[in-house]
Image (tube, rainbow, N blue to C red):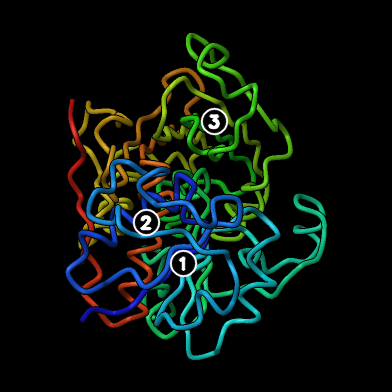
Amino acid sequence: MGVRVAVAGASGYAGGELLRLVAAHPDLEVAAVTARANAGQSLAAVHPHLRSLAHLTFSDTTPESLGDADLVFLALPHGASAELAAQLPQSVKVVDLGSDHRLVDEAAHARYYGGAHHPAWTYGLPELPGQRDRIAAAARVANTGCHAVAAILPLAPLVAAGVADPHDVVVTSASGTSGAGRSALTHLLGSEVMGDLSAYKVGAHRHVPEIKQATGVTTLTMVPVLAPMPRGILSSVAVRPIDGATDAEARDALSVAYADEPFVHVLDVGQQPHTSATAGANSALVQVVTDQDSGRLVLTCAVDNLGKGAAGQAVQNANLMLGLAETAGLTADGVAP
């Protein structure tokens, strides 16, 4: 018998990826799968690729349907996690893939999200200094946002090392369509997305305050882009170097920060991250170069938005919370072609 975990919102893309990872995990077993709109349906009808879990049926998302688990993953829309989590027994550990408990600053929450602000939980990015121990000691963890993790991982070490100016940062982040969820929306139809790139939520993306909170950046311009691919994020982060810092110095800071990290990889000089190289993996691929015209440092990072940007990150956090090997059930290797 493994540790019993439940997935709320299991019919969505992130929920399905969580189930795929848990099904192959050596120490976890699925105790419950819930979904409001799909309650009563077989899991096989919604996730036909999950053959090992095809016998399961979605139940309604209630505290009762989740409360017998040792740990609950909440893969729910914004605003749906806090009320449900508050009704779960304190003995049940929770990883929230939503945004309800990420932000410390109530004013930032009001500005970017609106609605009720809920107390911040332990932030679920183990690669940040000191955060691994905090996650391991926590009963409630707020998973990272997908765009946020692809910007934070290359940026945070450079700000901490005094290499990058935190007062002038520009992020352009292209994401696959699964990042928008599984709802049947016109702008996500294949005929609308294929052969097209489009910016969205420019100037007011919800991951801006999360990136600032995690890195110490004070001024951030962010342009999210919808890309014609099902999964993956490629983030480009442009920063001004401090005191003429070079890309070699920036690379040294990244290499020191991630020397012992199993999932964050600083690429060799001349290589650039590819989203396809992270498909199905919990990896983040990072690079830095100096722009010859502006002198800015340009950081690039690729992740799977459903992996390190969501479900893979959530399992990594759960492993720490449960005292398991941090890499259990996860892989740094992507799927190709």
Instruction: Check disc 1 and report the residue beneath it.
Output: 73
Q: Residue at x 35, y 31 (%)?
A: 289
Q: Residue at x 43, y 35 (%)?
A: 233
Decide which of tag 2 and tag 3 comes sooner along the chain: 2
Q: Are marks 2 and 3 in contact (CB under 8 Å)?
A: no
Give the quarter of the figure containing the C terminus: top left
Which class describes the residues within 10 Å of circle 3: few (<14), some (14-19), or many (20+)? some
Tally of numbered discs: 3
Label 2 to label 1, Cα distance in Å? 8 Å
Q: Residue at x 57, y 52 (%)?
A: 211
Decide which of tag 1 and tag 3 comes sooner along the chain: 1
Instruction: Check disc 2 and report the residue beneath it.
Output: 18
The amino acid beneath tag 1 is: Phe
Left or right of 301, for residue 206: right
Question: Residue 89: x percent and y percent?
Answer: 55, 88
Above/below status of 242 relative to 335: below
Q: Are marks 1 and 3 in contact (CB under 8 Å)?
A: no
Instruction: Check disc 3 and report the residue beneath it.
Output: 172
